[in-house]
Image (tube, rainbow, N blue to C red):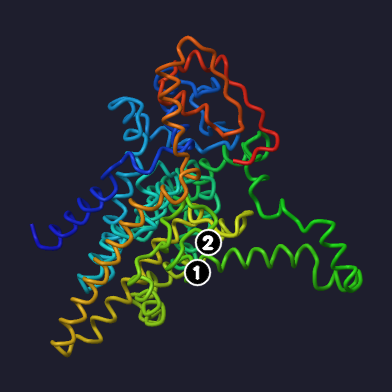
Amino acid sequence: MNRDKILIILIIIAAFFVRIYNYNYPPLLWDEASLGYNAYSILKTGRDEYGQYFPLVFKSFGDYKPGLYVYLALPFIALFGLNPLAVRLPSIILGSFIPLIAYLFTKKYFKNKLLPLFFAAVIAFNPFNIHFSRGAWETNVLTFELLLASYFFFNKKYFWSSVIFGLSLYTYQSGKLVSLLIICALLIINISKNFFKKDFIIKFIFPLIIFCIPIIYGLLFTEQGNRLKVVNLFSYPRSPAETQIIINETNPLDNQIFHSQLIFFARNFLIRYFNHFSPQFLLTEGDWQSSRHSAPYAGVLLIPSFLFLIIGLFTSSYSNKKYSSINLFFLLWLLLAPIPAALTRDSLSAVRSMSLSIPLCYFSVLGIIYTLKYFKENKYFYSSIKLFIFLSYLLSFIYYSDLYYNHMVKKSPQDWLYGYKQASEYMIKYGSNHDIYFTNFYGQAYIYYLFYSQYPPEKYQSQASLTTSGIDT
């Protein structure tokens, strides 16, 4: 076994350890508990918590979760029982293999053997990727799928690419849009007459259409579209009161020309879009919209990655035929990834833009390679730069680990739903002789009782009731 194979194996092992270490931290969120309990319900009865038989989309809290993660968790729950580890293992495992796919993706295109290894290593220890692969986050599975499907496409394995892209539609809500955008990028970069041949249509286009049919039907003719109505940017126009203030300041014509709803939505979209490229998000604060989506006082990148990202973006060559297609692909991915998040009500969303982590790491690695190449002629500076890169990443990772493990939950325990597990365990222990009632005052607290008590699914299915009007989950 050569050195590169040994190193990539060590990187994967390290990535897995970082993701599974202290797997009960942070506390289980109610979305994770819902995914686990629905998988448990399917395992025991073949139906979800509301009695639907093997659904593709789960009603859950009225947010209609795409169901792939539930089915991924099912075998682990069968093996280990209904517990946080079993629920989180699909994300932990796939998150650990993202570095391997990144390595294989770039190995074919670059003579420099360090680049694929660095790409894998940077992803393995990147805060953005670690955060969402330690919990049962569907967006992490989506990121794995997008990278794997793109890898298959570049290697002309169109059928498998189509299948993985198709599965991404059933993984996470934003996957419906970001998958379409990535597919468009792939078609543009690899444009060829072969795409109009029967073989490509049968292997790639036709399977995608089959996967899309249930999604389109669900959005148009069922309640699955409710979630989209709640979170999309266009459901929140400027209020009539604010419009009247603008008119009073000038006149109705001025309002129509400079302050119309179209301009209002365009401005809000651009603000949300560029927030994902701000130093505040990437370097110093992370997702300031939700403390659940990043560690406090730190960005979604390690500090040296942010510096090398700038170098990589400015030194990448798109004219070199050998590297132009892959560089252009990751550049388009970089530009397209924030769009699903920018089209929602939140000013920023790390969870909806998580696939952005892949091109961010890619261009960071290009910056590292360029820096090493620049100083290669001078042995003294070359050794010093290598040591600087290693130490800067090590210290930055230690700093991030301290923020993640020692400060994240303590800083905002209410956002991490601390206490829900403890309350459920108390009820399980002392509530057998009492009637227990759940309200929505504390959100979706009922799911913790179902999860930790392993409440019989067949019993709950006859009791489950949910009113979805006005949901805000």
Q: Describe residue 442's horizontal placement relative to residue 11 as left or right.
A: right
Amino acid type, mark 2:
Pro
Q: Quadrant of the N terminus?
A: bottom left
Number of other residues with Cα within 10 Å of mark 1, as a class: few under 14, some 14 to 19, many 20 or more: some
Residue at 37 percent of width and 29 percent of height: 74
Q: Are marks 2 and 1 in contact (CB under 8 Å)?
A: yes
For mark 1, give the secondary structure: loop
Tag in front: 2 or 1: 1
So how many labels did they put on this image? Answer: 2
Residue placed furthest toward the left: 1
Residue at 55 percent of width and 59 percent of height: 348
Query: Compared to 281, does 70 lie above or below?
Result: above
Number of other residues with Cα within 10 Å of mark 2, as a class: few under 14, some 14 to 19, many 20 or more: many
Nearer the observer, 328 or 193: 328
Residue at 31 percent of width and 57 percent of height: 402
Say if residue 157 shows up in the picture.
no
Q: Which x, y percent locates residue 173?
A: 54, 45
Say if residue 126 shows up in the picture.
yes
Q: CA distance from mark 2 to mark 1?
A: 9 Å
Query: Compared to 365, does 5 lie above or below?
Result: above
Q: Quadrant of the C terminus?
A: top right
For mark 2, give the secondary structure: loop
Residue underneath mark 1: 277
Residue placed furthest toward the bottom: 378
Q: Which x, y percent locates residue 167?
A: 45, 43
Residue placed furthest toward the top: 433
Nearer the observer, 224 or 311: 311
Amino acid type, mark 1:
Phe
Residue underneath mark 2: 338
